Amino acid sequence: MIVKICGLTDASQVHAATRLGADLIGFVFAKSKRQVTAEDVKTWIPHIVGDAKAVGVFVNQSIDEINKIVQKTGLDYVQLHGQETVADCRNCLVPVIKAVSVSTEADLDKIDAYLEVCEYVLIDGATPGSGQPFDWRLLERINHGKDRLILAGGLNPDNVNHAIEKTGVGGVDVSSGVETEGKKDEDKIHAFIQSAKEGSR
């Protein structure tokens, strides 16, 4: 089970999340209350513990701009959260996690094309980044490639185990679900990772 902790905003959070067992950590380069700069991320990546990988989250930024940030920071993955095409994903310098918003069964049809060129596809609700879950039952009709799907949207330490059982995905992603008053909470991160890893056994 791959666990991604997203929206990290300082070196201490990077150290804590990876020390506690996160596989992927996300830095948001798109406009957001958690937005970071390439200069910051370059100094935070050395604080990663173990084999965890750094992910840059982008929304509709040019692929040239994204690739420059990758080269400057040493990101291991990029996560594309906008209207990026399959061709855009192909042109990234590092492996891609493509976010797909799912609110109806028809939205599931987009997943296969992205799986052909991306390392993972992240499945989120109609309003990505809102912290709201979508109807996980929609994923029941997917019968292949689930080990490369990462579930996002409304996850927290209390429901992540159930979400994994219900969907059979290979990864989970959380940001606000491990925060207290808008700040990353080490106890919640620890509880989330423990629950996610247990839920996949």
Image (cartoon, rainbow, N blue to C red):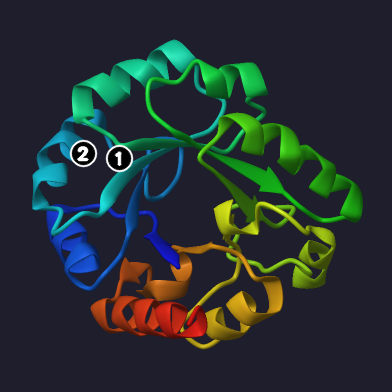
The residue at the point 28 percent across, 48 percent down is 53
Which mark identifies residue 36? 1
Task: Look at the picture and state if 149 lies above or below 166.
Answer: above
Viewer-side residue, 68 vs 201: 201
Image quarter of residue 124 = bottom right
Say whether residue 137 is visible.
yes
Q: How many marks?
A: 2
Looking at the image, tell me whether mark 2 or mark 1 is earlier in sequence order: 1
The residue at the point 82 percent across, 56 percent down is 103
Viewer-side residue, 58 vs 173: 173
The furthest residue to the top = 64
48 lies left or right of 197: left
98 lies left or right of 201: right
Residue 82, position in %: x, y?
62, 33
Task: Look at the picture and state if 74 lies above or below 191.
Answer: above
Tell me the amino acid under the disc marked 2. Answer: Val
Say whether residue 85 is visible.
no
Q: For numbered disc 1, what is the local secondary structure?
A: loop
- Nearer to us of marks 2 and 1 is 2
Q: For numbered disc 2, what is the local secondary structure?
A: helix
Label 2–label 1 contact, CB within 8 A: yes
Tell me the amino acid under the disc marked 1. Answer: Val
133 lies left or right of 120: right
The residue at the point 29 percent across, 80 percent down is 190
- How far separated are the C-alphas under marks 2 and 1? 7 Å
Residue 44, position in %: x, y?
14, 45
6 lies left or right of 72: right
Image quarter of residue 133 = bottom right
Residue 60, position in %: x, y?
57, 25
Which quarter shows the N terminus?
A: bottom left
Task: Look at the picture and state if 183 lies above or below 196.
Answer: above
Residue on which disc 2 sits: 41
